[in-house]
Image (cartoon, grey):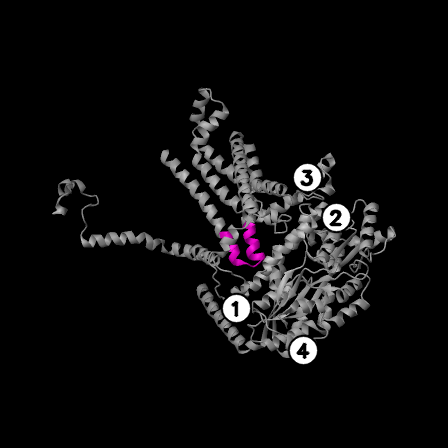
Amino acid sequence: MATEAPAPRRPRPTETAGKQSRPPLPPAAARRARRRAGAPWLLLAPALLAVAGLLLWPLTRVLWMSVQDYGLPEIVSGDTNYVGLDNYTEILGDAYLWQTVLPNTLGFAFACVALTVVLGTLVALLLQRLGPLWRTITGSAIMMAWAMPAVTGTYVWIWLFDPLSGAVVGGLDSLGVVDAGDTNWFTSRLGFYAIATLNVVHHSFPFVAITVFAGLLTIPKELHEAAIVDGANAWQRFWSITVPTIKPIFMVVIILSTIWDFKVFVQLYLMPGGSGANRDVLNLGVWSYVESFAQRQYGMGSAIAVLLTLLLLGVTVVYIRTLFKESEEL
Amino acid sequence: MKKRVIAVSVVLSFAAVACGSGGGSDGGDRALTVWIMEGTNPDSKPFFSEVSKAFKKETGAELKVQYVPWPDAHDKFTKAMAGGTTPDVAEVGSTWTAEFAEAGALADIGDRVGEAGLDKDLVEGLETAGTYDEKLYGMPWYAGVRSLVYRKDLFEKHDLKAPTTWKELQDVAGELGEKEPDMIPFPVVGDNEYILDAFVWGAGGELATEKDGDWKAAINSPKSIKGVEFYTELATEHKTSTKAATTWNEADLVDNITNGKVAMAVSGSWTPATIVADAPELKGKLASAPIPGPDGGMSPSFLGGSHLGLFNESENQDLGWELIKLLSTGSFAEKWGEQSGYFPGQTSLVEKVEKEGDALTAPFAKQMIEGGATVPVTPAYGEIQGKKTLAQMLQSILSGKKSVKQAADDAAKDMDKTFGN
C-alpha cells in the first residue's frame, strides 16, 4: 500500500514522455543504471591505478617508514624496525623544531608569498598600462627570470652577495658602508634569509604577474570607465573593481605560492652554510633531507616530511574553503 | 616490403640478444663487474683498459668497469644494496667502509690479505679506516693527506720559512698579513672538519674515544679544546683569516688559492696539480710542508682515500680478490698514484715517493707515513659527519655566536646523542 501512496503525485506518462522515468525501475533497467554508474569508474581505472602506483604507494611507504627506525642496515636486509611514534615524539619534543625550523619555514614562506604576490600584481598592472612594444619587452624580461633554473639562479645570487668579491659587497665597500674583509651575511639568520627571499621572489613573481595580467584582461572596460565617471581614483578602483572581480585568481596564485614557498629546498640548500653547517638556517624541507640522506636516518626524515605535508594540507584546506565560500557568494 | 625488413631485423636482433645473454651465462663466472669513482684520475679509461688486458691475461676473465661520479656514489651503493645489484668489486670511500660493513654488504678480506703477505705493508690510517669490529673490509688502495701549502715566491720575497711550531705558524701568518695586505695569510675554513681535526689531534686531543665498543665524544676534553682554540683564534684574535672563510668549504679554499688570494693554507695533496693546471702563473710558486705540532714535530692529518671492497653478494669472490691485488699492489698501484696525484695504500710505495718525489710532493708523503690519522671508525660517525656537527661548532665560534668551550660542549652533546649515550 505504501508504494501506492505517492501515486497521485506522479506525473502522468504523457508529461514525462521523452524524459527519464523516476518511479522504481524494472530489474533490467536497474542493472543498466548500475552498469552506467560503474562505467565512469571503469574508464577512470587506468588513471587511478597509475595515480595509486605513483603517488599513493610511495606515500604509504613514507608513512610506514616514519614509524620505524630505518637506516642502511634495514635497507640492505629489508627488515622492518617498528618503533611506533618515537620519531614523532622526538621531533615534536625538540626545541630546535619550535625555535628554529618552524619559525624559519613559516616566516620565510609568508614573506615570500606576500612579496611575490604584491610585486607580481604591480608588474601585472604595469603590463596592462604599457603599449604593445614595451609590453613585449617587459614580458620577455620577466619571462627570463622565470625561465632561469633554480640552481643557476641561486649561484648567481650567491656570487652577487659573495662576502669577499661579490658585486654587492664591492659596491657597499667603495661607498664606505661595509668593510669587504669583515662582512659575511650568510652567517646570520636574517641575512641568509633576506638573500634567499630575494632569490625566491625574483624567481617566482613572473608567474604571478602573467597570471594576474591574464585575469586583468577579463575585466570589462566599462566597469573602470563607470568608476572614473563616478570620480573614483586608481586606488579605489583597484580595491573596489579589480580585486573583487579577479579574486579567484588571487586565491589560486596565493595557494600555489604558499605550497611552493613552504617547501623551498634548492635555493636554501645550495647557499653557504645551508646544507647543515649552519643549524640556524634550516627549514623543514632541508632538515628532512639532512636527517634522511646526510645522516641516513630515513625514518626520522620521513616523519619530518609527513609533518611538512600535514602542515601544507592544513594551509591548503583553509584556503580552499575560503575559495569555495567566495564562489558560492558570487 | 620496408615493414618486412624491419620485422626481420627486429627478430634477428632479438635472436642476437638471446645468443649474447646465453653466451654470457655460460661464461658468467669469467666476468667481473667493478665500480670505480669518476674524477679521481682525470682520465681513468686508458688506465683501466690496460688493467683489463692484464687481468684477462692473468685470469682469462673479462672486466666490466662502470664509472660512478663521487656525489652520486653513496646513493647508488645504497640503492644497489637495497635491490641486491651490487657489483663484485668496488672502490669505496674510506669513510663509508665501516658503514657498508655494518650493513652486511662487504666481505671480510682479512684472511686473504694475510695469506698474500700484504698485511704488514698497509698504510696505517687507511687500514684503521677499513677495519670494523676487528675485521678488515677494505683493502687500502690510495689516499691523500692534507698538509701546509704555501706560496714559495712570497716566502722567499719576505725571507720567511715554513713554520715548524704553532707559535711560528701564528707569527708567519701575522707577518704575511702585514707584508701582503691584499692577501689572506691563513684562512680558517668554516665548512670543513678535516683541517680542524689536524689541530685537535696535534694538541693531543681526540674527536671521540672508544671503550668496549662504546663511543664517547671527546671534542670538549681540555686537550681537544686547546686545539680548537688555537685554530679558531687565528681568525678571531690574530686576523689571519677573513669573515668570508666562515662559510667556505674546501672547494672555495682551492678556488681562492688558485686566484692568488691565499698565502698559506692547509690543503690536500691532490690540490696543487689542479691549482697549477687552472692557474699556470703559479707554476713553481707552490711548496708544501707537514702541518707542525704545537712544539715541533707534526700534527696528525686525516687520510682521505679509497678502499677496494669485495661484496658479499658476489659469486666471483676469488676472481674479485685477484683484481683487488692487481690494482692495489705493484706497478698499477704506483701508476694510479702518479696519474691521480694520490698516494698508494702501501707504505713501501709511499716511502718511494718520499725519497724520489719533488719538493712539493715529498712533504705530503712524509705527512702520510708519519702523521696520518683517521676519524672514529664507526657508522655513527658517518651520521655525525652528515649532520656536520664539527662544521657547525666551527662556524658558531667563527661568527661569534658561541665561545669555544660552549660550542665544543654543544658539539659533544650532539655527538653523544648519535653515539647513543
Q: Nearer the viewer, residue B291 or B337?
A: B291
The disc at residue B12 is: none
Looking at the image, residue A249 sits to the left or right of residue B251; the answer is left
Alpha carbon distance from label 1 to label 2: 49 Å
Mark 1 / mark 2, whichever is N-terminal:
1
Please name the predominant secondary structure of the magenta segment in the image. helix
Residue at 84% from the left image edge and 46% from the top image edge: B179
Q: Secondary structure at mark 2?
A: helix
Q: Nearer the viewer, mark 2 or mark 3?
A: 2
Residue A168, numbered label: 3
* Amino acid type at image mark 3: Val
Q: Do the residues bearing badges 4 and 3 touch, measured as CB atoms within 8 Å?
A: no
Give the amino acid at mark 1: Gly
**Residue B63 location, quadrant:** bottom right
Q: Is residue A27 shown left or right of residue B313?
A: left
Range drawn in magenta: A285-305
| Distance CA(mark 4)–CA(mark 3) | 60 Å
Residues marked 1 and 4, same chain: yes
| Disc sitting over residue B84 in the figure | 1
Q: Secondary structure at mark 4?
A: helix
Q: Gap between marks 1 and 4, in whole Å?
A: 29 Å
Mark 4 surroundings: few (<14), some (14-19) or many (≥20) residues within 10 A: few
Residue B235 - label: 2
The numbered disc on residue B114 is 4
- Determine if marks 4 and 3 fall on one subunit: no
Q: Are marks 1 and 3 on the same chain?
A: no
